[in-house]
Every structure is written in structure tokens, then in C-alpha cells.
């Protein structure tokens, strides 16, 4: 590809893609870009900066304004389309400015067959390249090779943007995003203080109430600890999802999202 600007969220897929690009093209032919907005957890930006610095690549942190897009704020189920459209509309001119031939995303082979992924459509429409998907690399492949390469992200838990915590049909606002981030940080701290190690944790915003998703093995333990759940503040009620954490949980609510308006 000559040279690439990697859309770098800091997750396992984009981290591996960035490392692979450096191995193939050299650091001078690669740059990383982490979009900064209200939907990005603050700690993810810090980790992304450190990873990119370790590879010796330029790391850009352009601001994106998803909130300016009505379809994003409306959160009607295709929110990711508008988010990815905003991202690529910012990164494409950034790549051109720095003489980079392509913008690459960390879409993998699993993503391509995962069903409802409007963000992939937006990126495809804007000409983004997807080396992991093109190579047929699944998430398991990414983790396996990342481990072999000694990348610290090989076992990093899934870290979707904060907007993914808000139920479809509930408007996305900066205040809601900040409330979710505060709740997750506070609950993780409470669990750590209680000696409970958790890998995956989400606080889902269902409008007037929060739904906590944690590792399945911890559901019963945490559901019985009201003293820990009180750390999730700003909601009228807090519940623990009995099914535990799973990616794409909000898609399950698409059929009845209107009841959370």
C-alpha cells in the first residue's frame, strides 16, 4: 500500500494493524490517528499515545464532532454509520496532508460477518482499506499473533466507544457519555477495592436506569452487593444483567428501543 494512516482506537485490532504496518512499511511510512471526542474514554487516549510512541510512529489526535451529525445524536440504530462517517471525513484529509496514501481501519474477518455493522458500510463508502479483513484474520488470529509479537494489547478486553453503552432510541449527549464513563470508572474502583477482579465491565444507559454487565462468573456476586452498585450514580435505578457481559448487547434492544425514550 506504500503508506498508511491507521485509524487507531488503541484496541487489540487497530494496535496489531499498526504494528503490522510498521513491520511492512517502516515507521516512516505509517502514522496513527486517534480521534478525540466525548465518546472516547480518557484512559484510552493515554494508552494509545504510549503504544504509538513505542513503535516510533507519528501519532495524531484530531478532534471529531459526531454530535454535529443529527443521525448520531438520534441514536436510532445506525449511529455507528454517522460516527464512522465523521471519523473518515476527518482522517482522509489528514492522510492527504501528510502524504499518506491510504486510511486503514482495524476491521477484522469476524466483523465482516457479524451482521449489523453500519460503521463498516460508512468506511467502505469512503475508501478505507481493511488489511485484517482482507487477510482473513479473525479476532483470535489477531490476539494469537499479537501475543507472539509481544504486543501488550494481545489480551486487552474489548473497549467500544462510550456511545455504545447508550440504548438505541435514547439521545446521545455529552452529559450521558460523561455519566456512563464516571459510572464505569467508579464501579471498577469499587470492585477493585473489594478485591473483586473484573475483566469486562459495561454500564449501559437505558434512559432512566443503568444496566451493569460484568463477566458471567461474577454476575451473582455483584448482584448481591448493593454496597458496590451504589457507586453507579446519576441513574434512578441500577440493575445487573443476569446474562453477563457480551459485545453487541445493545443490538438486542433494537426491536423495543422505543420504550426507553
Image: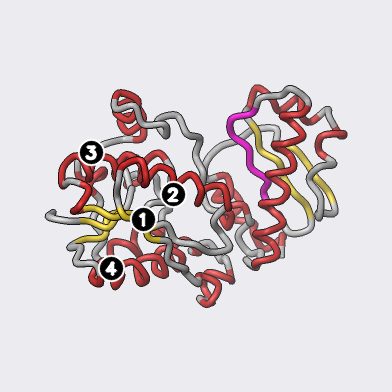
For disc 1, the marked residue is 59
Coloring applied to the structure:
secondary structure
Secondary structure type for disc 1: strand
State which quadrant residue 172 falls in.
bottom right
Residue 224: x and y, percent?
83, 27
Q: Residue at x 63, y 56 (%)?
A: 166
For disc 3, the marked residue is 136
Residue 79: x and y, percent?
50, 64
- Asked whether disc 4 touches disc 1, contact meaning CB atoms under 8 Å apart, the reply is no
Per the image, is 201 magenta?
A: yes
Mark closer to the observer (2, 3): 2
For disc 4, the marked residue is 126
State the CA–CA distance, disc 3 to disc 4.
21 Å
For disc 2, the marked residue is 49
Above or below 242: residue 170 = below
State which quadrant residue 254 falls in.
bottom right
- Which sits earlier in the primary sequence, circle 3 or circle 4? 4
State the CA–CA distance, disc 1 to disc 3.
27 Å
- Asked whether disc 4 touches disc 2, contact meaning CB atoms under 8 Å apart, the reply is no
- Asked whether disc 2 touches disc 1, contact meaning CB atoms under 8 Å apart, the reply is yes
| The residue stretch that appears in magenta | 198-204
State the CA–CA distance, disc 4 to disc 2.
26 Å
Please state if 161 lies on the left or on the right of 183 as rendered.
left
Mark closer to the observer (4, 2): 2
Q: Residue at x 79, y 31 (%)?
A: 223
Amino acid at each position: 500500500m506504500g503508506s498508511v494512516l491507521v485509524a487507531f482506537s488503541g484496541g487489540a485490532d487497530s494496535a496489531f494493524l499498526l504494528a503490522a504496518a510498521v513491520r511492512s512499511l517502516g515507521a516512516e511510512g505509517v502514522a496513527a490517528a486517534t480521534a478525540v471526542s466525548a465518546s472516547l474514554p480518557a484512559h484510552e487516549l493515554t494508552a494509545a499515545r504510549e503504544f504509538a510512541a513505542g513503535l516510533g510512529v507519528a501519532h495524531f489526535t484530531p478532534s471529531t464532532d459526531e454530535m454535529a451529525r443529527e443521525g448520531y445524536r438520534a441514536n436510532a440504530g445506525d449511529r455507528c454509520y454517522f460516527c464512522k462517517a465523521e471519523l473518515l471525513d476527518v482522517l482522509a484529509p489528514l492522510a492527504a496532508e501528510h502524504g499518506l496514501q491510504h486510511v486503514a481501519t482495524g476491521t477484522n474477518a469476524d466483523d465482516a460477518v457479524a451482521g449489523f455493522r453500519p460503521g463498516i458500510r460508512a468506511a467502505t463508502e469512503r475508501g478505507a482499506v481493511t488489511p485484517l479483513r482482507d487477510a482473513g484474520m479473525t479476532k483470535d488470529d489477531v490476539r494469537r499473533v499479537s501475543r507472539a509479537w509481544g504486543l501488550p494489547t494481545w489480551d486487552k478486553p474489548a473497549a467500544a466507544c462510550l456511545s455504545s453503552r447508550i440504548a438505541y432510541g435514547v439521545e446521545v449527549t455529552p452529559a450521558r457519555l460523561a455519566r456512563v464513563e464516571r459510572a464505569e470508572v467508579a464501579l471498577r474502583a469499587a470492585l477493585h477495592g473489594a478485591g473483586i477482579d473484573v475483566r469486562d465491565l459495561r454500564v449501559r444507559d437505558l434512559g432512566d436506569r443503568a444496566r451493569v454487565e460484568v463477566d458471567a462468573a461474577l454476575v451473582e456476586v455483584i448482584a448481591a452487593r448493593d454496597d458496590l452498585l451504589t457507586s453507579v450514580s446519576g441513574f434512578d435505578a441500577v440493575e445487573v444483567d443476569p446474562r453477563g457481559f457480551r459485545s453487541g448487547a445493545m443490538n438486542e434492544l433494537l426491536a423495543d428501543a422505543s420504550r426507553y425514550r
